[in-house]
Image (spheres, rainbow, N blue to C red):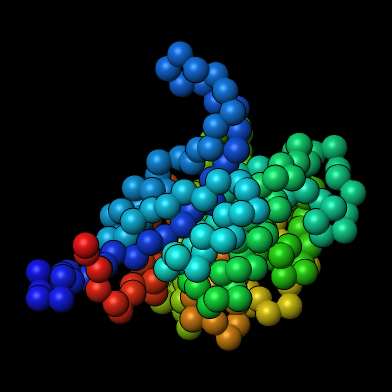
């Protein structure tokens, strides 16, 4: 410790992850909970950063300025009214609180220039928040269920990536993504560019033009691929050192 009371050890990036608000059973309890699959937090820790869970409250946006980056995580369908559509019978029950919270978190992160990694539902929030629309049931468009083979089962989708992008630099020209989605981007939002597609044409990766690191992927890299989380942590690394009491 130096004479000014500060340590020379670099401060680990603080990365906020949006969380579910669901009823959950654990131990002797069955009650409303804020939760997130541990695969996300394990990837953040393995990348050398510290995870901070953001509950599905609009007030979570107030925490963004204290964070170094944000992950918009996977989850249930975005409410169709958010992009001016009526729900189809195949569309899941909305989570209005979570939609509102994540759109607020995204808006604040973009305003402050924070790195963002948007995963599955998160990529759909990214596109919706910027004015795009969603395809509510991908099998109706592509004619198969390979992106979401069964409840609780991940499919594997080969995705061709633009090598001259953040995602292409991190992953190379192609990736076998673990997918579990029945919705996807329909009309691309202004400011986003497509950086990866599945063989059936489904948009699987996007980036926000003019920013250093705002990346959306439709698959689930938290399941088995640390590289995007490593890239996010590198983009989020603060230059300042940890202040100690």
Q: Is residue 213 left or right of residue 120?
A: left
Q: Where 170 sits versus 59, above or below? A: below
Count all numbered tags in the image, as a single digit. Answer: 0
Q: Residue at x 61, y 54 (%)?
A: 59
Q: Position of residue 230 (x, y in %)?
A: 34, 65
The quadrant of the picture occupied by the C terminus is bottom left
Q: Residue at x 46, y 40 (%)?
A: 37
Seen from the viewer's position, the closer of residues 86 and 135 is: 86
Is residue 6 at all visible to an observer of this figure? yes
Q: Quadrant of residue 72?
A: bottom right
Q: Position of residue 67 (x, y in %)?
A: 44, 64
Q: Where 63 sits versus 57, above or below? A: below
Q: Is residue 37 left or right of residue 32?
A: left
Q: Residue at x 86, y 45 (%)?
A: 87
The quadrant of the picture occupied by the N terminus is bottom left
Q: Quadrant of residue 205?
A: bottom right
Q: Quadrant of residue 238?
A: bottom left
Q: Position of residue 112 (x, y in %)?
A: 55, 76
Is residue 77 at all visible to an observer of this figure? no
Q: Position of residue 11 (x, y in %)?
A: 26, 67
Seen from the viewer's position, the closer of residues 122 and 29 is: 29
Q: State the residue lying farthest toward the top.
A: 28
Seen from the viewer's position, the closer of residues 85 and 144 is: 85
Q: Where 194 sits versus 42, above or below? A: below
Q: State the residue lying farthest toward the bottom.
A: 210
Q: Residue at x 25, y 73 (%)?
A: 241
Q: Is residue 229 left or right of residue 90?
A: left
């Amino acid at each position: 410790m130096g004479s000014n009371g500060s340590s020379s050890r670099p401060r680990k990036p603080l990365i906020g992850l949006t969380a579910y608000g669901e009823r959950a059973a654990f131990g002797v309890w069955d009650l409303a909970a804020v939760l997130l699959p541990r695969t996300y937090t394990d990837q953040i820790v393995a990348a050398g950063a510290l995870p901070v869970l953001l509950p599905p409250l609009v007030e979570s946006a107030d925490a963004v300025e204290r964070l170094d980056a944000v992950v918009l995580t996977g989850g249930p369908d975005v409410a169709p009214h958010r992009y001016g559509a009526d729900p189809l019978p195949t569309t899941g029950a909305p989570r209005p609180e979570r939609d509102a919270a994540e759109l607020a978190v995204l808006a604040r992160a973009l305003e402050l220039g924070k790195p963002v990694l948007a995963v599955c539902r998160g990529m759909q929030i990214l596109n919706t928040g910027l004015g795009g629309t969603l395809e509510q049931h991908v099998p109706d468009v592509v004619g198969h269920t390979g992106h979401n083979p069964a409840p609780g089962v991940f499919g594997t989708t080969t995705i061709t990536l633009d090598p001259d992008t953040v995602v292409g630099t991190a992953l190379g020209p192609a990736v076998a993504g673990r997918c579990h989605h029945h919705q996807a981007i329909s009309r691309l939002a202004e400011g986003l560019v497509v950086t990866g597609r599945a063989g059936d044409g489904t948009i699987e990766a996007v980036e926000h033009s003019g920013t250093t690191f705002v990346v959306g992927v439709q698959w689930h890299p938290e399941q088995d691929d640390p590289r995007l989380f490593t890239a996010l942590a590198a983009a989020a690394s603060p230059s300042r050192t940890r202040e100690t009491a």
